[in-house]
Image (cartoon, rainbow, N blue to C red):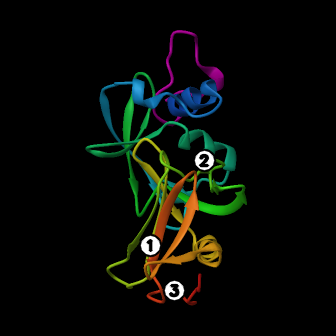
Amino acid sequence: MPSLSVMTHLEAPTGLAAIAAAAGATRGVAPVERWDPAHCGEIDILIRADGIWMHEGSPIGRAEMVRLFSTVLRKDADGYCLVTPVEKLGIRVEDLPFRAVAMEAGGDILRFVTDVGDLVEAGPDHPLVVQTDPATGEPAPRLHVRGDLWARVVRSVFYELVERAAVVDETLTVASGGVMFALGPRGVGLEQDHET
C-alpha cells in the first residue's frame, strides 16, 4: 500500500490508513451505526484486557491514534470491527474495548472517563452493571459507553463506587441519573461492609 503522503487523488486509502482518515474526519465519535460497508477481512489489532491496543504484536504508542481508532469501533453480531463508510475490518478484544479509569460525582450524576477519553454519565442510557467473574469470584463491573461497546470499570474506580454506596436490601447500591445501580451483595467480594 502506498504511503498517504505519496498517494495521488485517484488512490483511496485502505486498511489502517482508511480507518485513520475516516476517524480524523469525524472529530468525535463517527456515525458508525449508519455505515454498512462490506466486510473486508481481519486486521491484526488486539485490544488487550489491560486496555493496551496492539497492532501486529506491538503496542500502538500514540494515544491520538488509539483515540482515532476508538471512534470508528463497533460491535456487530460477528464481533468487534473498525468501520469506515466503505470498509469493515474485524479486530480482536480480550475483555471489553474500553476501561473506565476515572470517576467524578456532581449532583446526582456519576461521570466516568474512559482510557480513550470518552466522558460517560451513568444513567438510564448508560447503565452500570456488576457481574461476578466466574474465574475469580470477584466483581466484574462494566459501564455502557455507546452502541454495544462497554468499558471495564478499573478496580480503583470500583472501590470509589463502593465508598459512595448505600445498602438497600443487603445490596450495595449507587445512584446516578435517577437510576439505582447494584454493586453486589453487602460484603461479598467487596473489602468493606457499608451501613446506611
Based on the picture, tell me whether residue 95 belongs to the magenta stretch: no
* Magenta residues, start to end: 1-16
Q: Is residue 167 left or right of residue 147?
A: right
Horizontal side, residue 114 vs residue 89: left or right: right
The residue tagged with tag 1: helix, strand or loop?
Answer: strand
Can you identify the residue that label 2 sits on? 66
Kindly indicate the quadrant of the structure image that contains residue 65: top right
Residue name at image x 58 percent, y 27 percent: 21
Q: Is residue 56 above or below residue 9?
A: below
Mark 3 in CB contact with mark 2 (< 8 angstroms)? no
Q: Is residue 48 visible?
A: no
- The amino acid pointed to by label 1 is Ala
What kind of element bears circle 3?
Answer: loop
Mark 3–mark 1 Cα distance, whole angstroms, equals 11 Å
- Which class describes the residues within 10 Å of circle 2: few (<14), some (14-19), or many (20+)? some
Q: Earlier in the sequence, mark 3 or mark 2?
A: 2
Q: Looking at the image, which residue is at 49% across and 18% down? A: 12
Numbered circle sitting on residue 190: 3
**x and y percentages locating residue 16 in the rendered image:** 51, 36
Measured Cα–Cα span from mark 2 to mark 1: 24 Å
Residue 74: % across, % down: 42, 40
- Residue 140 is marked as 1
